[in-house]
Amino acid sequence: MPSKKVVIGMSGGVDSSVSAWLLKEQGYEVVGLFMKNWEDDDDSEYCSTRQDWIDAASVADVVGVDIEAVNFAAEYKDRVFAEFLREYQAGRTPNPDVLCNAEIKFKAFLDHAMKLGADLIATGHYARVREVDSGPHAGRFELLKALDASKDQSYFLHRLNQAQLSKTLFPLGEIPKTEVRKIAEKLKLPNAKKKDSTGICFIGERPFREFLNRYLSFKPGPMKTPDGTTVGNHVGLSFYTIGQRKGIGLGGMKSHKNADGNHDAWYVAKKDVENNTLYVVQGHDHPWLLSSALGASQVSWIAGVAPEQDQLSAKTRYRQADVQCMFSAQHDDSFALHFRDPQWAVTPGQSAVLYDGDVCLGGGIIDTATPAA
């Protein structure tokens, strides 16, 4: 029986490189696909596409797999970047990786791979897929957290559906990142010591404010405290996010000391888009930064239906431990979460992702946050 053909997204990074090798070791027929999804200012010092392609091709050579490059720049601009800009213009803070996974890596890429005759696709994400083998949900595919909790990326994958998951392999789901680096060094992969990328999905690392400046219209306005006192001016609401501490421009402003006699730091607490006003507070635990509930829309459930249970756990941002919550589905493609412990800096535009233990159930885009106080 011929081995199954797997098309793997190879980014030039160490994770997807080791994934390709693992799949080959497991007996699959492996083909690498390098996705080019950003063309604006591609000659700038920030965009590493050319180097990434060289790294991906060099790894493919070492591992012994064919690789081809495919350009999804038009799809990326239409489906991901346009939405990204719309959200910022509306004063929210979107998560481009969530949209990028749903629209490019597991839609445009999956479609292309199937045209190449693939049986399955794979990526270097840290997550797991499991098919339920018995009971009322037999045959359903579940998205699980990676065994390496510090690298788990299920949060970014919560918009995947049954059709996508049924065709997807995550070779790194059971492996700690430290082991991945060791494998890369043992194989003498040319990118074994390459740093992990942290920039905007496919766009790379660049000065964020300067980058947004090119695409958004913005208007400076007042920066106020909760009592209405103006303490400065903001440069445009799009450039700030709830909970932001650095780059606000109030470093020299001191108003009161905390219990230790030190001056409390300033934080962005609220955006009033209608009046173009940015509200700032002092102190990490200011009541305006804490939320007891949130509302979310644009929901996506991995099982295709909303969870039945009401006691679940959730993440409202990627780098966060799961927190217990009460879940209630709303009638129109939305849900509400109520938290036992108030959550810090719940941010409209970010994703609220729900879990039942290690199983990622799906989630939605945060619209509103209810202050704890």
Image: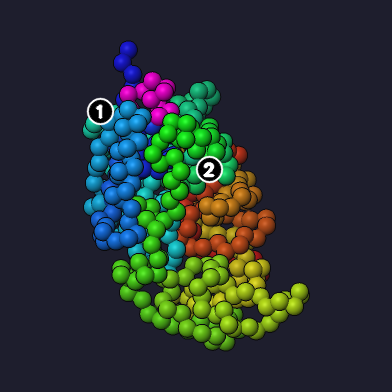
Residue on which disc 1 sits: 117
Of 323 and 261, nearer the camera is 261
Residue on which disc 2 sits: 152
Three-letter code for the amino acid on which mark 2 is drawn: Asp
Could you tell me residue 243's position as x and y percent?
56, 67
Question: Residue at coordinates 53% horizontally, 39% vertically from top-left?
Answer: 177
Label 2, secondary structure: give it.
Answer: loop
Magenta range: 21-30
- The answer to whether 227 is drawn above or below residue 210 in the figure is below
Could you tell me residue 195's position as x and y percent?
45, 48
Q: In which quadrant of the rendered image does the N terminus lie?
A: top left
From the viewer's perspective, is 209 left or right of 65?
right
Q: Is residue 317 visible?
A: yes
The mark nearer the N terminus, 2 or 1, is 1
- The answer to whether 291 is drawn above or below residue 172 in the figure is below
Of 296 and 254, nearer the camera is 254
- Cβ–Cβ under 8 Å for marks 2 and 1: no
